[in-house]
Image (cartoon, grey):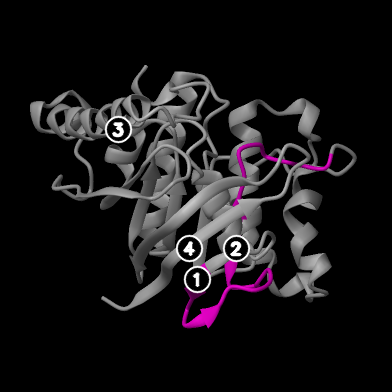
Amino acid sequence: MKDVIVVDNVSKVYASERGPVHALDRFSMKVGEGDFVAIVGPSGCGKTTLLWGLTGLHPNTGGKATILGKPVDKPRRDVGIIFQQANLLPWRSLIQNIRFPLEIMKEDLSKYEERIKELIESVELTGFDNHYPRELSGGMQQRASIVRALSYDPKVLLMDEPFGSLDAYTRDEMDTLLLEIWKKTKKTIAFVTHRIEEAVYLANRVYVMTPRPGSNSAEFDIDLPRPRPEGITTTKKYFDIVTEIKKRIVSDVEKQKEEGVYKSQAFSTVT
């Protein structure tokens, strides 16, 4: 499998009034073409920092990251980004929000109308084209953000806890929808989440980060069938994988606490 995303010993240090904040420390990762990889770790470990570095919006301070063989040094058309919040513009309708990146790229919108229509149908938003964000539920807004990211057909999707603010039922629905989209499009996906259960359900491989500064702790190949059968999340094998990953994270946190260097204020990963 050809590597599409390569993160090689990437580090990130933020400057602040209280001194430098070391967010990432020589973290490495590879995501193959059409693969689905998740990144987990304790709160504040640098998961989002890692993903933002891959967008080209926040340059890293050490190491190297490439996507499709090219250094990550600026935002790119072949990379779609889905954030924690839908970030829809409140004064634009759903369809206007979806078209927005195409307008920025000065594309001929008529060439994308059929694709956008099919995407809207695939996420069950048909009939809501002219609704404004305030008229849509949180799940509907995130569906719209997925369509927006896919509208110009990027090869890579970077997803930063996109369903974290949704209720449990809607989040499970969105996870299943995302797998259906991935199966159909075979996009290369790097997915950050604080929920280990979600990572195991979605991904082929899970990278575990240490507490800040985030570095490599472990890598788990998820040996579960594709497509995920109904009820997979109630099986012993699924729970065993989730438990193993949780134990690894707890061990990393306890080790850092013993060394007196644990910097995170919260640990939502094992709740």
The residue beneath circle 3 is 249
Residue 241 in percent (x, y) is at 17, 35
Residue 10 numbered tag: 4
Where does residue 175 sit, x and y in percent of width and height? 41, 37
Q: Toward the viewer: 67 or 174?
A: 67
Describe residue 28's horizontal placement relative to residue 136 as left or right: left
**Kind of residue at disc 2:** Asn
Residue at x 43%, y 64% (from the top left corner): 187
The foreground one among 155 and 63 is 63
Query: Residue extending furthest right?
Result: 91
Residue indicated by mark 2: 60
Q: Is residue 268 left or right of residue 99?
A: left
Query: Is there a contact, CB below 8 Å, between mark 4 and mark 1?
Result: yes
- Labels 1, 2: front one: 2
Q: Is residue 77 above or below residue 115?
A: below
Q: Are marks 4 and 2 in contact (CB under 8 Å)?
A: yes
* Relative side of 45 to 216, left or right: right
Proximity of marks 1 and 3: CB atoms separated by less than 8 Å: no
Query: In the image, is residue 261 part of the stretch drawn in magenta?
Result: no
- The residues tagged by marks 1 and 3 sit, at their Cα atoms, a distance apart of 25 Å
Q: Which mark is first along the chain, 2 or 1?
A: 2
